[in-house]
Amino acid sequence: MTEKLYYTTPFMTSCEATVLSCEKTAEGCIVTLDRSIIFPEGGGQPADHGTIDGIRILDAHEKDGVIYHTCAAPVEVGSRCRVELDIARRLDHSEQHTGEHILSGVAHNLCGAQNVGFHMAADYCTIDLDVFLDEDALSNLEAEANNAVRRNLPVTAEHMNHERLAQINLRKKSDIKSDDIRVVFIGGGEIDSCTCCGTHCASTGEVGYIRISDSQKYKGGTRIWFACGSRAVNAANELTRSVTAMARSYSTSREELPAAVRKQSDELNSAKRDLKARTQALCDLIAANDARKIAITTIDGFGANDVKMLSESLVSHNARVALVFGIKDGCTCYRALRADGESAPMNELVKAVNALVNGKGGGSPAFAQGSAASRITPEIIGSLENFVEKWFQGNN
């Protein structure tokens, strides 16, 4: 068994220990000590990092009460060593984990939600709740969680057996079989009470700030992305910088940015409608002046939607079959369309075009489309026109 100093003296940042074993593996050297301040991975929380006599601790995990430290190099068995904690990493994890308890407890108290999943990564944290929370509910949850932070309530832990556990109210019942169960209380249980093996701040005030950054409906409930402490402050600062830069690009203030974006969006949608109407008019004009029954047309500046529009205009006017090539930004898109009552398979036509221009695409007998990475030259167009004419003569 390893003496777990991160529980008995949670604010200790270094300690002396005796090296009990050291085994080389593919992952590194696995070291055990008689005592340790290094928290092993558990409860959704990553392991602490630090050093043993200056040798980096890469990871730590616990099995049967023994903490196994994965180190970058071997340590002499039987020696006395000095264990140093990566304080910044511990503080970050403690802020996130304490914030998770606050959010989960407040969500349970406000709307009966149960935390059914928690994940802490290096750059984000998530909570999965078993009920769906809309934007108003999430805003209220964030506000109440930060109110608990401002109250600077105590965060305490108690080790107890199952008999004692049965006498208290818990947000989440434990299925731990051990008779040494650790329960964490936020505000004496007013905000939260839950079995937990992780590290935490001494009070809610040390969390500093809780920020819900995103959410989505997940398995009938809600997945929440959140950040606490310095992570939350850094994320808020980065968002402010991004919004400020965007506001400056619109020559407006941060406060007026939403209105400026809405105005530009309305103008863009109006311009798109005007462009579509003008493109349709151009397509109809081209089609009205094209008397060919098999119309093969190439037009610069047309993308996939424009090619579709022109092929439909050609067929609606005179063409039995339309094959339209649009050339835009150095790429070519094409679409083959037949008139009602025609039997020529357009998917076979596009398959032949693909082979000639090294393109990709397909479709149905009624219409098909494709694209080629390279620009189509006049010589290629001439070859395609001859090919398609001959192809249709031989298949109609």
Image (tube, grey):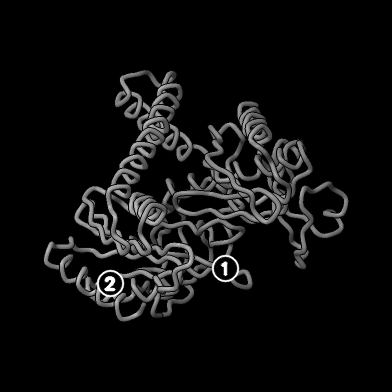
Foreground label between 1 and 2: 2
In the depicted view, which residue is nearer to us: 211 or 357? Answer: 357
Local crowd at mark 1 within 10 Å, few (<14), some, or many (≥20)?
some
Q: Name the residue at 18% across, 65% down.
A: 381
Q: Residue 327 at what x, y percent from top left?
A: 23, 54
Q: Residue at x 46, y 76 (%)?
A: 21
Which numbered disc flags the more N-terminal residue, 1 or 2?
Answer: 1
Mark 1 residue type: Glu
Left or right: residue 228 versus residue 256 is right
Residue 62: which numbered mark, if any? 1
Secondary structure, mark 2, is helix
In the rendered image, residue 262, in percent from the top left (x then y), is placed at: 45, 26
What crowding class fits label 2: few (fewer than 14 Cα within 10 Å), some (14-19), or many (20 or more)? many
264 relative to 142 in the view: left or right: left
Q: Check the image and report above or below for 387 versus 298.
A: below
Total labels drawn = 2
- Classify 396 as above or below 148: below
44 over 88 or under it: above or below: below
Residue 353 is marked as 2
Estimate the x, y position of residue 193 in percent, counting from the top left: 74, 45
**Are dots 1 and 2 in contact, CB under 8 Å?**
no
User: Residue 384 falls in which quadrant of the image?
Assistant: bottom left
Q: For the point 51% across and 56% down, which residue is it?
A: 37
Please state which of residues 340 and 82 is positioned toward the viewer in this rendering.
340
Task: Say whether residue 9 is visible.
Answer: no
Residue 380 lies left or right of residue 46; in this view the side is left
In space, the residues marked 1 and 2 are separated at their CA atoms by 63 Å
Residue 31 versus residue 217: which sits nearer the camera? Answer: 217
Quadrant housing the C terminus: bottom left
Residue 5: mark? none
**Is residue 377 found left or right of 390 in the rendered image?**
left
